[in-house]
Amino acid sequence: MSDRWRQPYLLLVELSWWRFLALVTGLYLLINLLFAGLYLLDPAGIGGSDDLPVSLRAFFLSVETLATIGYGSLYPDSLWVHLVTTGEAITGLILVALITGLAFARFARTPQSVEFAEQARIEAQEGRECLVIRLHNSRPNTLFDVRVRVFWQPHDGDRQLRPLPLLTPDGLPMLDDLRLLHPLEDGGPLAGHDRDPAAGGGELLVSFSGMDATLERPIHLVHRYPARAIVRAGPATP
């Protein structure tokens, strides 16, 4: 988690919408409270209506300055308050630019539409034993130039990714479902796992890329299957 805080842009883009909005609201209130405290260093410099307590006048002057509203009922009336409003105006410009950019980046993200089956299965396909991974496109559109790579990462010392060749060709369009087949042949990374898929541990990594035909944007996904999520559909082929 500490490493994620070193990349605030990625963290803010990946946050759920309700957390993002809660964070923006909290930051907005905090900034206004900080500037209200600066205004209160010279409460006589806050001109305008005297109907409100001075603390509320300082807060609402901050809100109107930060949002560049400027109703005129509250205004700076001393050099100190003028200086603080100048600093707050600059802060407001930067804050609006940052939040607008983050909101646009979040809206511009390609919607996640590719769903992976909960389990990878070992079953007989095309006359031989195969590892089968099923994908589903949940949106009523086409993904084209689909390319998928599957890797096995054993839980041994080097944890090196070992590619699993697929019978599914690259570049296929994906309308709704896609089935990936990896034949369990002798000498392959999973050759020793055909009887007990979870033997020895490890995990499957599925790398997916394609182009959304509606939005004309690339899609890149990585999905992991732990060894326990690899199950046998039926008795092994003799």
Image: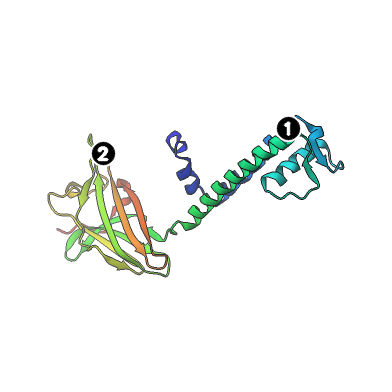
> In the current view of this chain or complex, which residue is farthest to the top?
41
Q: Quadrant of residue 140?
A: bottom left
* 169 w.r.t. 224: above or below: below
Q: CA distance from mark 1 to mark 2?
A: 64 Å
Q: Which mark is residue 186?
A: none
Label 2 element class:
loop
Question: For this rendering, which residue is in front, 70 or 108?
Answer: 70
Q: Residue at x 28, y 63 (%)?
A: 179
- The nearer-to-camera label among 1 and 2 is 1
Q: Residue at x 30, y 62 (%)?
A: 146
Q: Position of residue 98 (x, y in %)?
A: 54, 46
Counting from the top left corner in percent of width and height, residue 76 is at: 76, 39
Residue plotted at (27% across, 59% down): 147
Q: Residues within 10 Å of mark 1 (few under 14, many from 20)?
A: some
Query: What amino acid does circle 2 point to?
Result: His
Residue 215: quadrant of the picture: bottom left
Residue 87 location, x and y as percent? 65, 37
User: Which residue extends farthest left?
Assistant: 186
- Number of numbered discs overlaid on the protein picture: 2
Query: What residue did someone put label 2 on?
Result: 155
Residue 203 locus on image (x, y percent): 29, 46
Can the viewer see residue 154 in this picture?
yes
Can you identify the residue that label 1 sits on? 80
Identify whether 133 is placed above or below 175: above
Q: Is residue 33 visible?
A: no
The quarter in which the C terminus is drawn is bottom left
Q: Which is more toward the observer, 43 or 26?
A: 43
At x 79%, y 48%, the residue is: 72
